[in-house]
Every structure is written in C-alpha cells, then in structure tokens.
Amino acid sequence: MTVQTTEGATPVTKEPPPSGPDSRPPGEAAPRGRRSLPSGWLPYLLIAPAVLALTVFLGYPLVRNVLVSFQQLGRMEMISRATVWTGFDNYVELLRDDAFWAVVVRTFVFMAVNVALIMLGGTLIGLLLNRLGKAMRLVLSLALVMAWAMPIVASATVFRWLFDTQFGVVNWVMRSLGFAGYEQHNWFQTGFSTLAIVTLLIVWASVPFVALNMYAGLTTISGELYEAARMDGATNYRIFRSVVFPLLKPFFLITTFLEIIWVFKAFAQIYALNQGGPNRESETLPVFAYVEGMSQMQFGVAAAASVLTILILIVAMSFYFRLILKQEDEQ
Amino acid sequence: MRRKLIAAIGVAAMMGVAACGSDGGEDAQSGDGDKTLTVWVMDGSAPEEWVTELNKEFEAAHEGVTVEIQTQQWNGIQEKVTTALSEDAPPDVLELGNTQTAGYAVTGGLADLTDMKDELGYDTWNEGMLPSAELDGQLYAAPWWAANRVVIYDKSIFADAGVEPPTTREEWVEGLQKIEDETDAQPIYLPGQSWYVYSGFLWDEGGDLAVEDGDQWKGALATPEGAAAMNFYEELQSFSTAPKDTDEATPQQSTDIVPKGDVASWIGLGWEANGAIAAIEEAGGEADFGYFPVPGKTAEQPGHVFFGGSNLAVPERSQNKELAQEWLKLATSEEWMKKYAEATGGAALPNSQAAQITPEPGSFAEAMVQSADVGRLTPITPGWANVETDPNPVKQYMTNVLNGTDPKKAGDDADEAITERINQG
C-alpha cells in the first residue's frame, strides 16, 4: 500500500504519486466516507421493523415447518394434541416414493419451459415497445400492465371457464372454426394438457414484467451505439447479440432468476385450474405439499416435502447465485 | 450493496416457497352469565322452521342461553372439523356425516355418550344408522337422519317417449334408449364421479369398496365385481353429456343443471330434488317430477343404495358440554324427530321407526323408503374418512375407467391408495 496520505500536504514534492494518476488514496477515503453515516443504535432501529416482520411471518413458520417435518401429524395428533416425533421417517418415505420423484422432475421441466417462454416472449415484446410509436407504445404498455395487475385467482378462474368442457368459450371457438372433436372436449383430461393450460396462464401473466423491464433497460442504451454498429454493417440480430445483450446482461440474469423462483413456487394457478389433477398428474412440488397436508391431513409429510423443496431450490439456485455474483465482480 | 440486495431478494423469494399459512380461529365463548351454544349443521340438513322452533323451546327451558346455528358446506368439511376439534373452544354440537364419524371418534375429540344411552333412546334407534355412531362398543354420537338416493325424472319427458318408471336394470336402460331416440332431452344426467351411485352398483354385484384383511383393510375395486359395477355405470353414463371428471356437486346438478331443462332424469337426494324444484319455480317454471328407486337386477329387490346420513356429536372440549348434550337429546328425541320428518316431507329418514311419517303417494320419500332396506354404508372403520379426502381414489378410478383405462389396472391403482389411507390412524 502507498504511504502517501493526503494530497497537497507536501506541495514541494515534485515526484508524481507512485499510485498513478488516481490521486484518491483507497486505504483512507472509504472509512472517511462512512463517518458521515449514522452510527450506534439508529441503523438497527431502522432495520428492526423489517427484521421483525421477516422473523414473525417467515422465520417462525419456517422453523415450525422444519419441526413438523420430523413429526407424525395428522387428524389424530391434531385433535388429541399429541406430539409424535418420528425422526427422518417422513423424509425417508418421500425419498423412496416414486411419485415424489415424478413430481420433482415434472416441476423442473414445467419451470424450464415456462421460464424459457416468458423470457423469450418478454424480450421480444420489450424490443417491440422500444420501436413502437408513442400512441401504440402507450396502448401496449397499458395492456401489459393490466395483464400483470390481474389477481391470480381471478385470472385462473377465468381460464378455468374459458376451457370448460360443457360451457367453455374455447370449445365453442374451435367448433366455430370448423375443427372436429371439440364437442365437450375436456381440456383437463390429462396432466400434460392441464399443465399446458397452466403454462399459457403463467406465461401470459408473467411476460409483462419482463417486457416492461426490458423496455426500461433498452432506454438506457444510447442511440449512438446502434448507429456505430450499423456503420460497421451489423445485422439486427448481431446488434442484439453484441450490443443489447451484453449491456443488459444483469437485467437478463436477475429477471431469469426471479422468474425461476416465481414459476417454481406457482401454486394458485395450478391448484385453481384442476387441483393438481387428474390423478395428481399436474402436481408440482408446492401443490404436492398442499395436497398432502391440507387435503389429506398428513402435515408431517407435507412439511418434509416443503423442506425438501427449499433444499432442492437452494442447490439449483446456488449455481445461479454464483453466476450473478461473478457478473457483479466483472463490473 | 447491489450484490447483497440481490441475495436478499433471492432468500426472501425462496422463503416464500415454504410459507404456507393456516388459520383456525374460532369465536371464543362469551364468559359472562349468558351462554351461547354454537351448533354446526350441514347445508341442507336442518329445515329453517324446525330448527327455529327447536331452539325456541330449548332457550325457554334454559334461561340465558342462546343457540346459534352455523351452517357449514360439505366441501372441505373434514379440514374444518379437524381444526375445530383441536381448538379450546370448538362448537358445542356438531353434525358429522355418517361415513366420517368413526374417524373423529377414534381421535378422542368427541365426547363419549355411552352413559346417556337410555336417556337418548338408544334402543329405539334405526339399526341401519347405529353402526356409524359407535366405535368399539362406545357411543360417540346420536344418529340424526339418513337418506338415500332415488331416480328423479321429468314426468312429461317420460310420457312423451312413452316410458314407464322401470323396476329392473334392463327396463331402465331400454327406457333411456327410447328417450334418447324419441326426444331431444338428455336421458339421464350422470357425471363420471358420482361414487355413491357406483357404490350401490358395486353392492348389487356383491362387492364392496374395501374389505377386511386380517386386522387391516384393503381396497377392493380391482375385482370382477368392481369391473362389472363400473361396466353398468358406463352404460348409464353413455346416455349423459355430463363431464366424466366431476361429481354431482360440481356443477351442482340440482340447481345448476336440472333447472336449465332437457334433463329427463337424474339420481339425487331429497334436498336436491327440493332445491331443483325451488330453482325451477324461481325461474317461473313448474317442476313435474316423479320418483322411482334405483332399479335392481331383478324386480324383486331395488338396487342397493348408499345410506347417507348424519349424526350429532358433542366435541370433548366443548365449553358447555352439559348444555350441548341437553340440546342434542332434545333434537334427537322422538317428538322433535317426528317434527323433523314432517318438516322435510319425509325426504330424510328420522333416527327411529316411531318418528317416521307415512310418505305421501308419489313423493320423493315414498320412492326412497322402498330402497331403505337395501341401504348400505361405506366400510365402518376410522380410516375410511381418510379415503374420502381429495383427491378421492374412488372418483379417480371412475374417471379413468370411463376414459378407457382397463378396469383392472385403474382398480389396482385405486386399491393401492385406498389400502394406504384406510389403515392410517
């Protein structure tokens, strides 16, 4: 480290500072800057409400959830108020259960498909927003905001009715267009078709977030960069790959990260459309935990399933965390 | 700073995955001299005027006591009752479905009424209703009412097609075919998951939903009887445009389907028939219903039916246990059961022969009483209540077979789930 401390203390020195043109001494400036921030109890007081709320509403249920996952807790134990500790029995039972692993695989496939579609659709609409004229941009933005603002259960209910077997508009449209076989067509007959409709619902509701953020990000890219790229003869795709994407990389990373978490924990959409049915074939991990717990009153198993869900998600996301942190370091 | 922020968002978002809420606050009883007795009854069980009169008499005999009736929906009732029974201040009297009573009795959540047997008139009770109220020789509930399904038909559509009420399965199917050929109406409305109807067909074949296997139980749908019953169900269902993956309550057949018209017949309970009549009249029409028992294989005996019904029980933790037992005693007494039978027009069988009224000719009750002798219950074991929780394996079995799965394979899947659940404590 340099010994040079303060600028101008020795004006007679003709030698340039050894640390180069940057005259700010790194060892000293940082602590001096912090001195202006409040110290003592004030920061803790300010952060206390947030910590308290998190502890009460997330921390406590989480701890209870972990405790319950080591218990047998059903109708019997609830009513007789007995606490029956069973160690890792619930976990062992789940990990040996083929049905559980089928749910895990389904959850990841479902998530991957949804996130890919959301990011693709959101990016394209974001680019479109950037190129549209003022009036159309306003119209499109409003449409996006409305889709984004629609309450989940309300939109799920609407979708349920759109695809209803007896009275659904979609069957009517298909018939009117002349397709055969849509008299009483059951869109929820298989787990796959149910999840396909859920995907449509989730993608529709999630694209606005990505699109609007994408547009916000694009406005920060100066027009000169595009011009320069064009002068060099770059195609539109090349501009996206070499100009837009690198500049907006943090945006893509954090948005994908959030979408992964949101899709992973999507519950209301799946449950409201078909309760995880038919034959439990459209259950993802959160729905599986809910059905085991609330419907079948096997709260111990359900708690273990949700703990495993968190662990799986943490492992899967740790890779992503590292990517984001690396990205930060590069900047 | 940004890195920390991103990390914080990530952690918060992930914790959101695990956050699941549960609530179950029951109104606490008021502590002062005046007492409120809370009674949970199920939707459609307690006729308004009957329960009002009953409470008036009870309140007159017990000064300072107010009885509050809270009507509950069948949908999701098990979760609700379980939560209520685990509370310090549960309702004081509960109506419990007869298939579910044993499941609660075994938990110790219900007060033991064995000492009150004589007071309650145990010896006069209908023998078919009693088994569901008892567990291991102890009495945990008083039978209240029971009912079974009959076929409800539109007289004018049947007349148009020239079809008479059938007495055998063969006549039944022939009649439905005739209605299909000669009218525009849907011959029968039968959704794919009407599993109490299916149970009746299963009993007709000599099968059952689950059978005892040593000291355990096991599912019994993957049997020749199960397949034969499903075969007949499928034949009937082919006359219906109802969805194959819902039960009779979604959409509610009595109020959402039948009043829209063009349904020649459907299988339902007394309160459903009344609901349909009310809905039709509200829309300015006039219901013209006839009733016949679900036909059996021969004309000698009607088809088996599920003997659905309810018991009244007092939660062990009730804050007003003695008062609650008094109310239960009054409600299930012969006098009030007789009034109950009158109030329901015979659509629900009261708990004793003595309280029964003679049904009017051509009424729902008349058809219902004919098959009451062949009424059956779901397996009497505490674990049965677990089988009925969603997703109900019997319903899934039905939908799978109707959609073309081999009955044996669908039955094996269902039996596995039934066996696992029925043996759970």
Image: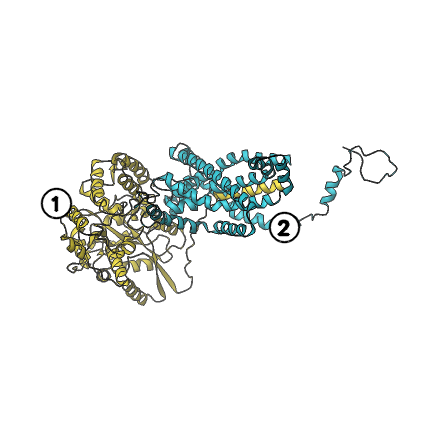
The reply to whether residue A298 is in sight is no
Label 2 sits on residue: A45
Corner quadrant of residue A292? top left
Label 1 sits on residue: B298
Q: Give SS at disc 1.
A: loop
Answer few, some or many: residues within 10 Å of disc 2's Cα (few below 14, many 20 plus, some between 14 and 19).
few
List x then y, in percent, for residue B399: 29, 41
Answer few, some or many: residues within 10 Å of disc 1's Cα (few below 14, many 20 plus, some between 14 and 19).
few
Nearest the eye: B279 or A183 = A183
Alpha carbon distance from label 1 to label 2:
82 Å
Chain ID at mark 2: A
Q: Give SS at disc 2.
A: helix
- Image-based side of B353 in relation to A230, left or right: left
Chain the render paints yellow = B
List x then y, in percent, for residue B388: 31, 45
Corner quadrant of residue B325? bottom left
Q: Amino acid at mark 1?
A: Thr
Q: Quadrant of the C terminus of chain A?
A: top right
Nearest the eye: B273 or B380 = B273
List x then y, in percent, for residue B211: 24, 38
**Above or below for B346 versus A45:** below
The reply to whether residue B93 is in sight is yes
